[in-house]
Amino acid sequence: MISDLNELRDKVVEWATQKGILSSTTSDKQALKMFEEAGEIAAALCRNDRTKLIDSIGDTLVCLICLSEVCDLSLEGCLEVAYSEISGRKGEMRGGVFVKTEDLDDLIGEPLDEDKKRSCMNCQVHDSGECMDVLSKGSCYKHKFGVNYDTA
């Protein structure tokens, strides 16, 4: 088994080169492919399918590697930039999601004052307790950030 992430990245780049992916794709097409694979992550989570989740996370990483190559960027360099940005970030957990301090008041466009909170009008909850709105329609602040308020 290959244990080094750099070695795996190199093997993905070699595979993508041999298949003609890197020479015939665009950044837009690779981004769209990555979004497709990320959608499969969401589907695997909804279905509690660990095998599909592992495959989908791997496929998403393959797409990110190809995207970084097409854009002539180092995946490692991108990760270093992201880490240096988040390493000192302050914020808090809201419903299992880290929200940076500067975004806390923007969650619903105003401070999280009990009298001013709004709800997701079409919220549906499935067996795992996750809000379907987060997966299919975008942000449902009630479930995504743990805000509790009436839906009426």
Image (cartoon, rainbow, N blue to C red):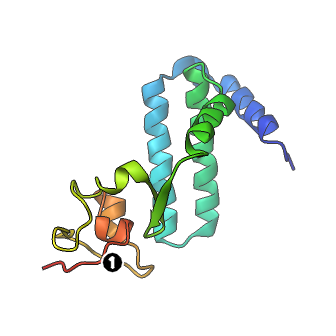
Tell me the quarter of the image containing the C terminus.
bottom left
Residue sitting nearer the eye, 21 or 67? 67
Residue 69: quarter of image: top right
What percent of the width, then of the height, locates residue 46?
A: 46, 69
Report whether 83 appears left or right of 149.
right
Which residue corresponds to mark 1?
125
Residue 55: quarter of image: bottom right
Residue sitting nearer the eye, 17 or 143? 143
Q: Residue at x 50, y 48 (%)?
A: 37
What percent of the width, then of the height, locates residue 44?
A: 52, 64
Q: Residue at x 32, y 72 (%)?
A: 147
Seen in the picture, residue 130 relative to 111 is either above or below; the reply is below
Residue sitting nearer the eye, 13 or 79? 79
Neighbor class of circle 1 (other Cα within 10 Å; few <14, some 14-19, many 20+) is: few
Report whether 36 appears left or right of 51.
left
Report whether 23 appears left or right of 103.
right
Seen in the picture, residue 139 relative to 61 is either above or below; the reply is below
Residue sitting nearer the eye, 32 or 95? 95
The amino acid beneath tag 1 is Val
What percent of the width, then of the height, locates residue 82?
A: 58, 38
Q: What is the secondary structure assignment of the residue under circle 1?
A: loop
User: How many numbered discs, if any?
Assistant: 1
Residue 114: quarter of image: bottom left
Which residue extends farthest left? 152
Q: Residue at x 56, y 22 (%)?
A: 70
Report whether 49 appears left or right of 126.
right
What percent of the width, then of the height, locates residue 120?
A: 21, 68
